[in-house]
Image: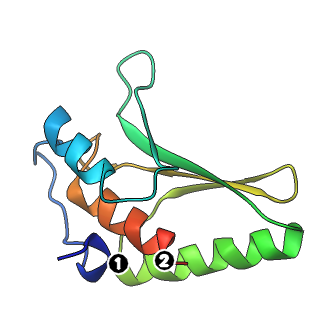
Amino acid sequence: MSLSSLKCVACKGGEPVLTTSEIEKYLEEVHEGWQLKHPPAGGPDKITRDFEFKNFLEAISFVNKVAKIAEEEQHHPNIYLHDYKRVKIDLYTHKIGGLHKNDFILASKIDNL
């Protein structure tokens, strides 16, 4: 079953973050543009992807589509619009301070846009 066919489930605080092997498995199931980031100073692991569009309006349209999916899934990424036509998306589960299966489900749904 593909990740994009799954629904994000409400995450409770105290759930474990994904293991390295689980992260590697899920990374194989999403677009190769998603990269694992290990922030300095003990911050949470994240997956991140950069997108570039033809112009500002296409970038904004994409951001709005991501927002709609995120709201439907009740799982909200950090979205950065920069250089007028570039969008960066960071995914991690705030409640557990790291990566959860939900992050990869949402990444997969974003890939389908």
Dot 1: element:
helix
Crowding around mark 1 (Cα neighbors within 10 Å: few <14, some 14 to 19, many 20+) is: some
The answer to which quarter of the image holds residue 78 is bottom right
Q: Is residue 60 left or right of residue 8?
A: right
* Residue holding disc 1: 73
The answer to which quarter of the image holds residue 79 is bottom right
Q: Amino acid at mark 2?
A: Asn
On the question of residue 99 being in view, the answer is yes
Q: Residue at x 21, y 48 (%)?
A: 25
Taking 45 as reference, is 75 above or below it? below
Q: Position of residue 43 (x, y in %)?
A: 38, 27
Q: Residue furthest top?
A: 41
What's the mark number on residue 52?
Answer: none
Which of 81/110 is in front? 110
Disc 1 + disc 2, Cβ < 8 Å:
no
Which of 55/80 is in front? 55
Q: Residue at x 24, y 74 (%)?
A: 2
Q: Position of residue 14 (x, y in %)?
A: 11, 45
* Residue holding disc 2: 112
Q: Residue at x 40, y 84 (%)?
A: 72
Q: Is residue 35 left or right of residue 11?
A: right
Taking 19 as reference, is 39 above or below it? above
Dot 2: element:
loop
Q: Amino acid at mark 1?
A: Glu
Q: How many marks?
A: 2
Crowding around mark 2 (Cα neighbors within 10 Å: few <14, some 14 to 19, many 20+) is: few
Q: Position of residue 21 (x, y in %)?
A: 15, 37
Q: Residue at x 29, y 41 (%)?
A: 98
